[in-house]
Amino acid sequence: MEKIGRYEFRANPFHCDCTGRLFMGHLGNHMLNAADFHANDRDFGIKYLQTINKAWVLSRFAIEMEKMPEIYEHFYIESWIESSMRFFTNRSFRVVGKDGKVYGHGKSIWAMIDTETRQPCNLLDIKDGELLQWELKEEPNPIGKLTRVVISNEAELVKSMPTGYHDVDINGHINSVKFIEHVMDLWDTEWHCEHKLKRVDVAYVAEGHKGDHLNLYREKVNELEYGVRVCRENGDELCRMRLVFE
Amino acid sequence: MEKIGRYEFRANPFHCDCTGRLFMGHLGNHMLNAADFHANDRDFGIKYLQTINKAWVLSRFAIEMEKMPEIYEHFYIESWIESSMRFFTNRSFRVVGKDGKVYGHGKSIWAMIDTETRQPCNLLDIKDGELLQWELKEEPNPIGKLTRVVISNEAELVKSMPTGYHDVDINGHINSVKFIEHVMDLWDTEWHCEHKLKRVDVAYVAEGHKGDHLNLYREKVNELEYGVRVCRENGDELCRMRLVFE
């Protein structure tokens, strides 16, 4: 089995935004789907982990796109494990058009938890460190090392919203990509028609649960760069996000 | 070319709900995608219509499912034109598992409008009535004839909400399926974990636009049957929906 998995997707017309390009949320979900297929195909995905009461938890996620797939386009998401340490694994994504043109990249950091204690586990204990055999350190990913997502305490409360049925995944948690969608909805359709989200960096701090009410705090860093903090109503921070438009 | 188009989809893990089954909204969007592929492949889809300033408008939509595709499952959506009249065409959908088992059906009624005047057009004027050659009256669809969706004036205002970037499709209208998702969100995750939406009937009355603020009015018809009216803040009715849970 190859170290890089390659999965085909299609920019379905009803998954495209006002500009005819795939919604970033759909692209993000497709990356998570690709990660899941890649891991299951190599027998360290949730199907196997469920049998030993473990689960992958997304800790960091960044996407940077030069070009978004356009309506009706078929495209590939390639995914591979860059490296694995005791408590984290780095997973990369590359979005490639049918003609081989690279549209952009993603990068993610995952931890593994015990689903009963919710405590982190040593990834290298899984099947005697078998995860290491999938490492592909030399494969380029121009996103580079993920740095901290910092948001000051000046960020202003701009939205307070309930979560609902469509926010919750099979694990009973708020879907990681739903946070990106809720944050993107802080800008209206006109803004998104005129500005393309070029890069998004997300630091997941705590799991959201069904029934959570979210408070979104935003600050402007530069003309086209913003930071957003998403908290539960009681103040618990769930994630921080940095968005760069162009 | 066959009268029935058949398109493969997959219940991606991050498109599945708290019960591990595909979200009804994703299934509905896949039906609309299948309709679009079927029409474009036969050269009466939006790609051709754009060249003559026409567009399809969804007027009625019903889905009734015996079983929903489950996480990781590949399935097919088949679609065909049942009949076409001057101002409406009836399009059917069948959801079929990999093993050929029928999971459920959809039915829809579409009008065609002139994109400049927004007035309805005679479908049979398109390419001298070529649409008629795709009719397949004998193919069974147990959903039967779509009847009116009636909601009394007793329905109670249960939610008032803005629409945003993710509600708007490439035409600048609120995506038809987003109405179904917003209505389903009137019930919380616990409800949906315990009750499966078996059937939904939607009557689209007017197009929603970006920036619209929605008021949702609900009434209980029976223990597991509800009606919902979705209006703009000024009272204009956008759609009416009937939902049957089990």
Image (tube, coloured by chain):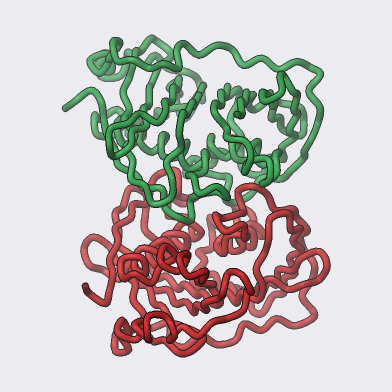
Chain colours: A red, B green
Image vertical order of residue B96 relative to residue B242, above or below: below
Which residue is depicted at the point 33% across and 40% down? B75
Which residue is depicted at the point 42% across and 70% down? A65
Q: Is residue B211 visible?
A: yes
Choose top left, top right, bottom left or bottom right for residue A126: bottom left
Q: Is residue A201 visible?
A: no
Q: Is residue A222 left or right of residue B14?
A: right
Image vertical order of residue B211 relative to residue B198, above or below: below
Q: Is residue A191 left or right of residue B69?
A: right
Which residue is depicted at the point 50% across and 77% down? A110
Which residue is depicted at the point 66% across and 23% down? B225
Q: Is residue A78 left or right of residue A150?
A: left
The percent coordinates of residue B245 (x first, y second) are 61, 29
Residue sitting at the far front: A52
Choose top left, top right, bottom left or bottom right for residue B155: top right
Choose top left, top right, bottom left or bottom right for residue B238: top right
Image vertical order of residue A3 relative to residue B3, above or below: below
Q: Is residue B130 left or right of residue B46?
A: left
Question: Residue B125 or A14: which is nearer the viewer?
Answer: A14
